[in-house]
Image (cartoon, grey):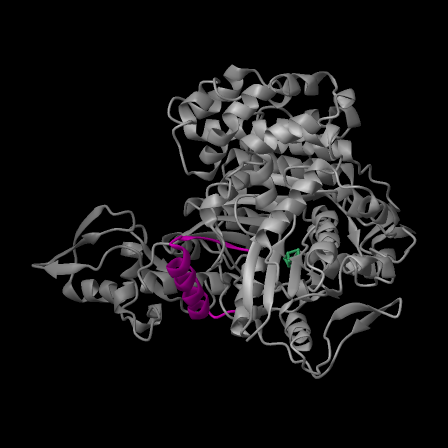
Amino acid sequence: MGLLIAMVVPPTLDLNTPYASAPRLTGWLRALGHRVVQVDLSLELFLRIYSRAGLKRLFAAVDTDKLAYDLTDIYDNRERYIRAIDSVVAFAQGRDMTPVHRIARRELIPEGPRFRRERAERRHAPYGEWGINDLARDLTARMFGDLSDLFRNTISKHYNLTTYGDRLAESCSSFDELEAELTRPANEIEKMLFEAASDTIPADVDLLCVTCPFPGNVLGSLLLGKWAAEQRPKAKRALGGGYPSTELRQISDPRVFRYIDYMVLDDGEVPLQQITALLSGQDVPLERTFTCDSGRVVYHTSAACAAPRFRDLPTPDYEGLDLQRYAHVIYHLNRVSRLLSEGSWLKLTAAHGCYWKKCAFCDVHLSYIGDFDPLSATGLADQMDALHQQTGRAGFHFTDEAAPPPLMVKLATELLRRDRSYQWWGNVRFDPGFTPDRCRVLAAGGMIAVTGGIEIASDELLPKIAKGITVKQVIHVLNAFTQAGIMTHAYLIHGFPGETEQDTINSLEVLRQMMQAKLLRSGFYHGFSMTAHSPIGKAPELYGLRTLGPQFAGFAHYVIQHRSAEQSGQNNAIRDALQAALAAYARGEGFERPVQAWVASFGFPKPTVAPDFVTSVLAEPLPAPKSPPQLVWLGSLPTWSRGLLQCSDQHGELLSLQVPKWMCEALAQCHPSSWKRGQPPLASDFQPSDWQSRFARFGLAAI
Ligand code: SF4
């Protein structure tokens, strides 16, 4: 019999759905024959805090000396919060929608400081008469925000709805501050975390696997390691995930190993396979794993450990995770945040790594970007079918770094062939491979949204980033998605080395035009940061950067401080102003305002981009496909009688056309139910070929 393993998600993370690595590694460990209990302590802590008993306890623990003016207001309303909380959480979980009316009518939820940032009429206006569900979810999120502000200021300075102690762990080269936090007495929130762990992690557990993706999970992960040492002393503790894999690759401080026994890097499958084999009594080497031996941190790796191909891994396993308990909280008022909060999206990955792996700021020297290994479309569709069968859910979020266009298109055709009705979305590169016809097929196959990095809409800077796309190409790709009904969201960078004020303002002008044309529906600015594993981090001098530190002191090494040779005015205030412009555009406001007015206090120049730049690009013809395309008919299977073809078109409208019989037969061959060997026919399979244009507008796509 295998080991008993707890696969633990630490506090605090997305409350909408389980973090992806837990079901993925659970699938792997169960395939190895182990018993795995999945424990989402991020969710468990949330549900404990936001309950009648939890709020009573935390209000009682509030240090009233720390109550500032706004927080007093929340505290004074504590009886109302306690009375409402169970109904509000049931609503957020989608278990009971009936509180929606009282929430929207402003009766159920006390309106704390986050509500006062906007007048009630203005807050309600975007939702209209019928949008009370969205409005209520927005108000509910504000309420959770108010309460978390109160608890952060009066109980634990680390507490946030989706992070715990993130500032402590952000590129902290020394472990000193974390150690100080780990050795002080637990606060009331941490006591609740330990109680949740006691209730959910089996007493006879052999191994705790804690996945730690972000800085905001480090303190929580190590606190759980401390708890396990006292409460589950026979269990070993393994830490892995995004944070160790990016920030802790040089770790040398043995104090960390008071809280963990193993720390693994990169994909967890093989390291955990070796650890579990070792704990089962086998004499095997460790792989990509740190331990502390005789007071020294030792890195173990073994050439004998072959990693399975990503495409050969088992399907993620959600057994044991109750998706009905997740709370659908909107963290930000943008379309992606809303999408994320619409339900528990099942997490899958179409391809390990990135097929492009060249961008100058990206961690291309690490496996999670650099080792590209795609699933096949049929393998991916099999995983979707298996998860749908296991959970009854039909919504998938692909956690790819940049899902490859050919694989996405093949997945869509495979789902059409299987006659599935799933909805899915994920991160892509705005690659010219996403043509208008391919996007139509993607939409028909269930794709509803894409997110992707534009970084900066400037043809001066995109080549320096090595993004491999031009602004014109991005415009055409966004247009292709939009015309197909697929929502688009972009990530932007401000402060890339060499970026001038003219570049910044020109980019904002292009974004303004894209959003006014509804090619782009929302966006988010990040500040440029230089990481140790990016091309810039490896050779900063090539980008005009001088590194300033930090001095490594045994713990994290990731973000490198730098001084830009150009000193291009990069700072948080400019980024906030740019983000405010994007937020206004996403609401459909502010298009008439000159872009330089958004950053007026920084003295930016006027844009030199033509005011009709985007529309003029859209008027340019697209390049013809290089090879004969495949043809996909997105309408229903056509019939022919007495010279008349009949079927419904892509949108379900009745189509009735006078055509020769052979043309109807040709169209029928393009319908997914007729494909030979699961593949759409080639355009060149048909002679003559000019018939196809007749059906293009009704849903005959050339991919
Ligand atoms: S930024 Fe995106 S497209 Fe560029 S290398 Fe990284 S993952 Fe790939």
- 214 horizontally vs 121: left or right: right
The picture places residue 168, in percent across and down from the top left corner, at: 80, 44
Which quadrant is the N terminus positioned in? Answer: bottom right
Q: Residue at x 16, y 58 (%)?
A: 659
Q: In this view, does 60 lie above or below 569?
A: above
Q: Which residue is drawn at 36% across and 53% down?
A: 444
Q: Is residue 51 above or below residue 455?
A: above
Query: Does the image show residue 81?
Result: yes
Q: Nearer the viewer, residue 672 or 630?
A: 672
Where ligand 1 lies, by image quadrant?
bottom right
Q: Quadrant of residue 379?
A: bottom left
The picture places residue 672, in percent across and down from the top left corner, at: 29, 64
Which quadrant is the C terminus positioned in? Answer: bottom left
Q: Residue at x 80, y 55 (%)?
A: 558
Q: Residue at x 31, y 73 (%)?
A: 685
The picture places residue 446, in percent across and down from the top left corner, at: 39, 53
- 338 horizontally vs 169: left or right: left
What is the span of residues highlighted in magenta in the rendered image?
375-400
Query: Does the image show residue 670?
Result: no
